[in-house]
Image: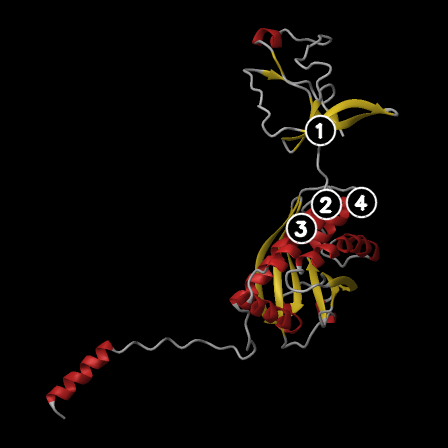
């Protein structure tokens, strides 16, 4: 072999790209969540967290929070082996999805919730025993309230009708799928007063996969169409139409000196710079929306709308404004 040929081979070897490192392959996990699937499930997870937080806080009247932790795909037997025993396992039907999903709520969280419902404080020291029938029934009443939140969260992927079909305490008795089948695990950090634990939602991957694939294909081909935008607006309008909004009618503010404020006492009368014939301003969220007049219906104060607030109405400013307290100054609708 000539010297020129050896030099040519050495040069080619130096410029040859290095081979990639071998990647491990788990034959128990032949499929994994794609980036589009993870993004779609994260939207579901974030919506669930917000809905669960609102439901727990309104039902328990306590400091509650639910935040997203992780989302992963694992074999079912691996997931079940890590569940505590006993536990509060709620089996869910998500029609038209095939199969059964499972919501795992830690016992410390469940006991803190039942304690608050029975007039307790929801302390950190909670028992580790299996829940009684009465305690399970109380927790089921809370979980029933989360069914609309689950339906709303899955709307971007598929329209489901969630329903509770059973409850278990032993993970070995909750056989959703075959041990080697893949499931999607969405985990959340749940806090009720001083108790913080991890809650999980387990869904068979085979039941969600067709809808996730269809969603990915639609996003790649069509993107956001006008029809989808209109449907989204309609859903938003439907969900916010029944929301409670605080409204208040305010008088015109007045100006007082520092000495006048310091000399105020019980029984003093403070005159307002508000003519009797001038309408009040109805506000919501700090925004003026209507001019109103104050009156009475039966034995209750009432407001009558006289017109919209002009957009060009100037905002009044003063060095020191004193408004009457809510007892005298505000008439709430």
- Residue 241's disc number: 2
Q: To which residue does mark 4 refer?
A: 118
Q: Is residue 228 above or below residue 247?
A: below
- Residue 179 position within the rendered picture, expressed as x and y whole percent measured from the top left: 65, 76
| Count of numbered marks | 4
**Secondary structure of residue under mark 3:** helix
The residue mark sitting in front, 4 or 1, is 1
Secondary structure at numbered mark 1: strand
Q: Which of 111 and 28 is in front in this view?
A: 28
Residue at 56% over, 16% down: 318
Measured Cα–Cα span from mark 2 to mark 4: 33 Å
Q: Is residue 117 left or right of residue 313?
A: right
Of labels 2 and 3, earlier in sequence is 3
- Report crowding for label 1: few under 14, some 14 to 19, many 20 or more residues within 10 A (C-alpha): few
Q: Residue 307 carries which label?
A: 1
Please name the residue that numbered disc 3 is placed on: 236
- Name the residue nearer the viewer: 140 or 96: 96
């Amino acid at each position: 072999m000539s010297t020129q040929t050896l030099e040519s081979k050495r040069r080619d070897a130096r410029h040859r790209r290095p081979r990639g490192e071998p990647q491990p392959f788990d034959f128990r996990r032949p499929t994994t969540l794609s980036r589009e699937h993870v993004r779609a499930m994260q939207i579901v997870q974030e919506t669930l967290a917000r809905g669960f937080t609102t439901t727990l806080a309104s039902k328990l009247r306590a400091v509650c929070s639910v935040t997203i932790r992780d989302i992963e795909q694992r074999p079912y037997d691996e997931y079940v082996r890590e569940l505590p025993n006993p536990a509060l396992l709620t089996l869910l039907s998500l029609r038209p999805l095939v199969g059964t999903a499972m919501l795992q709520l830690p016992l410390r969280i469940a006991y803190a919730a039942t304690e608050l419902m029975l007039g307790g404080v929801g302390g950190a020291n909670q028992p580790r025993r299996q829940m009684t029938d009465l305690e399970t029934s109380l927790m089921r009443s809370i979980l029933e309230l989360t069914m609309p939140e689950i339906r709303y969260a899955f709307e971007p992927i598929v329209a489901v009708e969630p329903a509770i079909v059973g409850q278990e305490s032993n993970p070995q008795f909750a056989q959703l799928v075959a041990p080697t089948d893949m499931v999607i695990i969405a985990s959340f950090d749940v806090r009720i007063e001083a108790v913080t634990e991890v809650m999980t939602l387990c869904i068979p991957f085979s039941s969600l996969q067709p809808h996730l694939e269809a969603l990915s294909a639609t996003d790649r081909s069509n993107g956001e169409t006008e029809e989808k935008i209109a449907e989204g607006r309609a859903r938003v309008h439907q969900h916010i139409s029944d929301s409670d909004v605080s409204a208040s009618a305010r008088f015109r503010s007045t100006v007082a000196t520092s000495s006048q404020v310091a000399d105020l006492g019980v029984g003093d009368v403070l005159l307002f710079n508000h003519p009797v014939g001038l309408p009040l301003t109805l506000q919501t969220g700090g925004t003026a929306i209507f001019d109103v007049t104050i009156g009475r219906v039966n034995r209750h104060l009432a407001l009558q709308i006289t017109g919209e607030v002009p957009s060009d109405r100037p905002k009044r400013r003063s060095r020191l404004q004193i408004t009457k307290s809510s007892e005298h100054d505000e008439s709430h609708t």
